[in-house]
């Protein structure tokens, strides 16, 4: 082989390696989102998609991550059921080749999904609240939304210290989420010496609540507390409450009321008190920057589901970037736990169980089909 031939060969090899390196650098980082895009919780999935896509657009416009790689969001419909969630995550991991799993709006669904992702892939739960999700101690499982326990502490204090009902009744679906809501409610009412006169649970396919509401009304409670994380079903429940006359005070479990629940309720939720970790009116510069960007893209103010989806994508992107990898999950998990993360609602810090806590909690009431801020407290 002549020297000229050797040099030509070396040049060709160098060019080939350069092309391969460039192709690798340009390969997008695929983030898989398992969301309820159909079924009773579809409004959460559609809202989450809007928030996630705004975040991905901002990351990509700023140059991407890991040396210029873009984020690519891929979706599967979890249908709002545990079986649907398992199938969605399995497909995202195998067919979709996702590097990270996120999404999650319903606790029973995310609990089922976590049995698939455990010790295999990073999973960042956007919206589901059940404590049991992160009680498992899965090293690669994180969540950006408050847990039921976190929300209940602030919300129940308002119910017992401000509303001060003498008696209360509870209605909710028989799920892990609602089980924890009820446990905290019982403890708060007992500590305030408020009698819980009725506890009524129902199955997922229930759509006629008239017999339950009639039974509850016979107890004549000062407060009706409803816990249901499926917007279309909750809207139907409150319509039937109105048809049967309503209650002196009415509350809805915190963290679930969005315009996607209020709109189909058609005014039936007016007067209902709830709580949340986010309001668009919060004046901090970071929050207002998010609100303005979302409003520019969608011509409406964002809600909490938009927020947690946006935060999840932003935190995932920055964590992968700081860790310098999209697949060394022990390293990424350590980076997530060791650092605070700037978000529209302030700095989030994950604890050992992978839970983030919101800086503020807002008490709201439905008036004329809209959520109106009553008061706020610092967590």
Image (cartoon, rainbow, N blue to C red):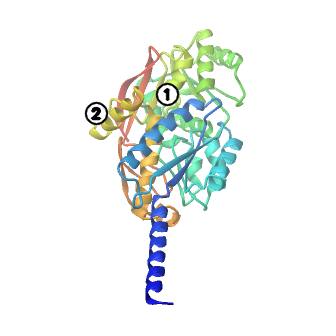
Q: Which residue is mark 1?
A: 258
Q: What number of labels is visible?
A: 2
Q: Quadrant of the C terminus?
A: top left
On residue 1, the disc is none
Secondary structure under tag 1 reads loop
The 10 Å Cα crowd at callout 2, few under 14, some 14 to 19, many 20 or more, is few
Evaluate if marks 1 and 2 touch, with contact meaning CB atoms under 8 Å apart: no
Secondary structure under tag 2 reads loop
Residue 369 in percent (x, y) is at 47, 16
Residue 58 in percent (x, y) is at 38, 44
Report how far apart the C-alphas of labels 1 and 2 lie in the structure.
Answer: 20 Å
Q: Which residue is mark 2?
A: 283
Q: Nearer the viewer, residue 226 or 59?
A: 59
In this rendering, does residue 343 appear at all? yes
Does residue 378 sit above or below 231 in this rendering?
below
Residue at 64% across, 29% down: 40
Would you identify the image quadrant in which residue 179 lies?
A: top right
In this rendering, does residue 308 appear at all? no
**Of label 1 and label 2, which has the lower sequence position?**
1
Would you identify the image quadrant in which residue 245 lies?
A: top right
Residue 272 in percent (x, y) is at 49, 20
In the rendered structure, the answer to whether residue 177 lies left or right of residue 210 reads left
In the rendered structure, the answer to whether residue 334 lies left or right of residue 34 reads left
The 10 Å Cα crowd at callout 1, few under 14, some 14 to 19, many 20 or more, is some
Q: Nearer the viewer, residue 374 or 60?
A: 60
């Amino acid at each position: 082989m002549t020297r000229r031939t050797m040099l030509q060969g070396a040049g060709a090899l160098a060019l080939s390696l350069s092309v391969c390196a460039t192709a690798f650098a340009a390969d997008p980082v695929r983030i898989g989102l398992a969301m309820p895009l159909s079924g009773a919780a579809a409004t959460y999935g559609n809202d989450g998609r809007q928030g996630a896509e705004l975040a991905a657009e901002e990351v990509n416009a700023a140059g991407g991550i890991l040396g210029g790689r873009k984020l690519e969001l891929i979706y599967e419909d979890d249908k709002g059921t545990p079986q649907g969630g398992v199938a969605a995550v399995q497909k995202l991991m195998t067919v979709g080749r996702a590097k990270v799993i996120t999404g999650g709006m319903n606790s029973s669904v995310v609990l089922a999904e976590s049995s698939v992702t455990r010790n295999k892939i990073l999973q960042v739960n956007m919206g589901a609240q059940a404590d049991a999700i992160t009680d498992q101690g899965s090293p690669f499982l994180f969540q950006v939304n408050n847990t039921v326990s976190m929300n209940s502490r602030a919300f129940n204090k308002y119910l017992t210290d401000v509303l001060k009902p003498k008696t209360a009744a509870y209605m909710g679906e028989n799920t892990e989420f609602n089980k924890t809501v009820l446990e905290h409610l019982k403890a708060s009412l007992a500590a305030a010496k408020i009698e819980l006169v009725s506890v009524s649970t129902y199955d997922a396919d229930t759509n006629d609540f008239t017999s339950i509401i009639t039974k509850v009304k016979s107890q004549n409670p000062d407060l009706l507390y409803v816990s249901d994380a499926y917007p279309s079903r909750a809207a139907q429940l409150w319509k039937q409450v109105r048809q049967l006359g309503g209650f002196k005070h009415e509350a809805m479990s915190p963290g679930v009321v969005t315009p996607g629940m209020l709109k189909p309720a058609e005014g039936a939720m007016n007067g209902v008190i709830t709580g949340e970790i986010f309001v668009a009116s919060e004046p901090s510069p970071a929050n207002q920057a998010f609100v303005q960007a979302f409003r520019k893209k969608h011509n409406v103010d964002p809600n909490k589901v938009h927020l947690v989806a946006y935060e999840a994508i932003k935190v995932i992107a920055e964590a992968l970037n700081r860790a310098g990898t999209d697949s060394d999950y022990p390293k990424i998990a350590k980076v997530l736990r060791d650092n605070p993360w700037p978000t529209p609602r302030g700095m989030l810090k994950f604890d050992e169980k992978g839970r983030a806590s919101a800086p503020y909690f807002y008490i709201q009431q439905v008036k004329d089909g809209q959520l109106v801020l009553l008061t706020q407290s610092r967590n």
